[in-house]
């Protein structure tokens, strides 16, 4: 059976642990298409470099130069690409798009960010937690900001899979999807983690080991007419908030909107591990590719 990685819970807790701890091998000359329907810096470069370092052939595709814009279906693209490459990595919009691609592909499909999830980022984040705190199991992560976006969903599912206590603090209008919260709760019940959703950023942060945030405006939401500043102001990660947890590490998947969800003081301060987190995209994705298509 072909294994896809479309969302964080596509890896079992044991498999996630394996990916987070394995030494990447080789993919032995296999080709990997990496397709972008949204902008990217880190994901693009880390996949291209990582595939090359594994001995594979990266084929980076900017979707603007394809036929997607004039309606070629994901189903047809999946069947065509499967004749050339050994895995397809894609960054796209609705999760139904990647689901269609995965349904028709005969090679593994990897989610490089959709509207719903950013599971490759989560692997890097969890690797960073292990690197700085020794383990993920039993550690508490507080994510502040847009509880309805891809990062919040991935923290819920990926964090629960890793046995973490995941707390999401978000304004009511940007609360996580109850279906995802409930799925994360189910996973946490088996891994010893837990899940909590609150509107109170201070309650979320109290006693936590990891503070995380993300942009308040995700790609594709720029012109949706919704105020994505005012409701989020109490959820900014700043010096006052970090005084509550002077030993916690701070994560941000980047790109950051300095002065909005995170201040310069925090981004550039001693608790920030965001550039280790960025580096770990490379290591985590090499491990994931080795796991899925390695030799
Ligand atoms: N964190 C992340 O996915 O960054 P890019 O959008 O630059 O790829
Ligand atoms: N939530 C952000 C993550 C960027 C890496 C977005 O989707 O734009």
Image (spheres, rainbow, N blue to C red):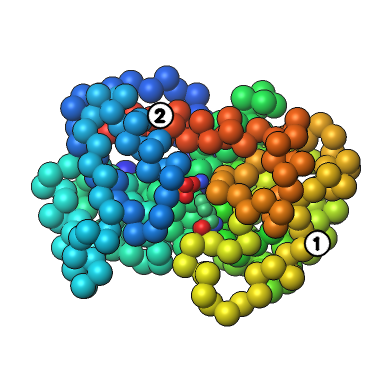
From this view, report whether residue 252 is shown above or below residue 93: above
Sort mark 2 into few (<14), some (14-19) or many (20+) by Cα contacts within 10 Å: many
- Secondary structure state at the residue bearing disc 1: helix
Q: Is residue 41 left or right of residue 293?
A: right
Q: What percent of the width, then of the height, locates residue 133?
A: 69, 26
- Kindly indicate the quadrant of the structure image that contains residue 52: top left
Q: Which residue is tagged 2?
A: 287
Residue 142 percent coordinates (x, y)? 73, 48
Q: Residue at x 70, y 36 (%)?
A: 268
| Residue 43 x, y percent position in the rendering | 42, 43
Residue occupying the point 62% across, 27% down: 130
Label whose residue precedes the other's in the sequence (2 or 1): 1
Quadrant containing the N terminus is top left
Q: For mark 2, give the secondary structure.
A: helix
Q: Residue at x 47, y 67 (%)?
A: 220
Judging by the rendered image, the residue that carries numbered circle 1 is 234
As drawn, the label of residue 124 is: none
Q: Of all residues shown, which one is farthest toward the bottom?
A: 225
């Amino acid at each position: 059976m072909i294994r896809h990685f479309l969302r964080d819970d596509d890896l079992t807790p044991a498999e996630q642990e394996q990916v987070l701890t394995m030494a990447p091998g080789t993919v032995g000359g296999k080709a990997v298409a990496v397709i972008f329907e949204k902008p990217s810096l880190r994901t693009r470069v880390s996949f291209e470099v990582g595939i090359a370092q594994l001995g594979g052939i990266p084929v980076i595709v900017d979707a603007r130069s394809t036929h997607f814009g004039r309606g070629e279906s994901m189903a047809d693209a999946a069947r065509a690409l499967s004749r050339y490459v050994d895995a397809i990595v894609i960054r796209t919009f609705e999760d139904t798009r990647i689901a269609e691609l995965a349904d028709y592909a005969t090679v593994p499909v990897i989610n490089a960010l959709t509207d719903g999830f950013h599971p490759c980022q989560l692997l890097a984040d969890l690797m960073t937690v292990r690197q700085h705190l020794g383990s993920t199991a039993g550690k508490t992560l507080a994510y502040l900001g847009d509880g309805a976006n891809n990062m919040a969903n991935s923290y819920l599912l990926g964090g629960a899979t890793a046995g973490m206590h995941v707390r999401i603090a978000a304004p009511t209008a940007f609360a996580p999807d109850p279906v995802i919260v409930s799925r994360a709760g189910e996973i946490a019940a088996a891994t010893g983690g837990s899940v909590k959703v609150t509107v109170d950023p201070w309650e979320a942060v109290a006693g936590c080991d990891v503070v995380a945030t993300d942009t308040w405006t995700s790609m594709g939401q720029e012109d949706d007419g919704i105020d994505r500043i005012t409701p989020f102001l109490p959820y900014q990660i700043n010096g006052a908030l970090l005084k509550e947890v002077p030993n916690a590490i701070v994560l941000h998947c980047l790109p950051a909107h300095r002065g909005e969800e995170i201040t310069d003081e925090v981004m550039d301060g001693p608790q920030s591990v965001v550039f280790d987190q960025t580096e770990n995209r490379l290591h985590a994705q090499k491990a994931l590719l080795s796991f899925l298509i390695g030799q």
